[in-house]
Amino acid sequence: MEQELVSRAAQLLAVEPALIEQALQEKGQYQRRTRKKPGKDAEGRPRIRVLHVPPPVVKEVQRAIHRHLLNLGNSWFRKLGSDFAWPIAMHGFLPRRSNLTAARDHIGNTALFTLDFADAFPSVRRERVATALRWHAKLGRQEANFIARLATYRGRLCQGSPSSPLLFNLVVLNLLKSLERLAAERGYRVTIYCDEVAITADKPIPAEERRAILQLVIQAGFAVHPKKIRYQEARWGALEVTKVLVRPDRLGLSTRHTIDRVRAFIDHLARRGTADTKELAKAKGYIGWVELVDPEKLKTRLRKSLAQLAKLEQSGGHS
């Protein structure tokens, strides 16, 4: 039976059966790694993100799962009879969508309710992944269970797996549909970006409706980070969603530290008088981010930095 599932999975994912067989053998050989996160925890210790990185063969199979999920809604699949499409309200982990596209959906509204899922990936068990694959990717029970087995570690989605982001999106779809129904009834707008749910309105969102939204999330089987439930109104200050400010007619940078960091980095390169290719690319990346979010800042606070960067580029990294 397993050999038959290997063959069917290989055909579905467009990989060789031998690759899947090897992945099954090496599935327990994940490596635990940690990365520092900004800020400190409640006890003043540095915050860390725990990653479980799959071995190369397992990662290759998981990349194939990622590609399959990414392609589910494209035109080629629709010609084959697929009716799946990633919802426009879902902005995380998808091409041409980002925290900026999520934030833009809320421009013009004056009240914002946001919440974050707690431990987003590890909170999703293998069974929920298999169920989502059956409902949304239209896989049979056995195929869905087998793909979920390849994509999870110790029975859960994990940080570090290339297939986890889109599988998480797939699991979140039913919740998003419930939130979209509520939003349509109330005249709200809803987006989900990675692990952040955002709902906005052109009028205050009553406390009882915020509780109803929270209850929908919990009933869908997701835990909510208690410190990341936030309600904002424009009369109290600019709304902030996905780390971007949402003003009545445009977006803005959520903190002046972003501009200060750009200025300091480029000034450091200019004072040193040299910059290698990576440093120039990093500086241009900073400038590109500001241009996307708040282009007015290029004229008001980054004119000197732009001139310094142009001089370094013209001289091939030497000023």
Image (cartoon, rainbow, N blue to C red):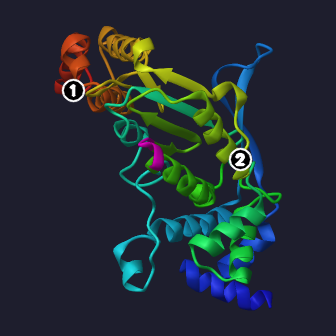
- Residue at 64 percent across and 28 percent down: it is 228
Q: Quadrant of residue 46?
A: top right
Q: How crowded is mark 2: few (under 14 residues within 10 Å), some or many (20 or more)?
A: many
- Residue at 66 percent across and 49 percent down: it is 160
Relative to the observer, which residue lies in front, 31 or 41?
41
Q: Mark number for residue 222?
A: 2
| Residue 187 colored in magenta in the image | yes
Q: In this view, does 223 lie above or below 257?
A: below
- How far separated are the C-alphas under marks 1 and 2? 48 Å
Q: How crowded is mark 1: few (under 14 residues within 10 Å), some or many (20 or more)?
A: some
- Residue at 71 percent across and 47 percent down: it is 222
- The type of residue carrying mark 2 is Phe
Q: How many marks?
A: 2
Viewer-nearest of discs 1 and 2: 2
What segment carries the magenta color? 185-189
Residue 50 lies left or right of residue 246; in this view the side is right
- For residue 50, say whether it is visible: yes
**Residue marked by disc 1:** 313
| Residue 178 colored in magenta in the image | no
Where is residue 84 shown, x and y percent of the image? 47, 71
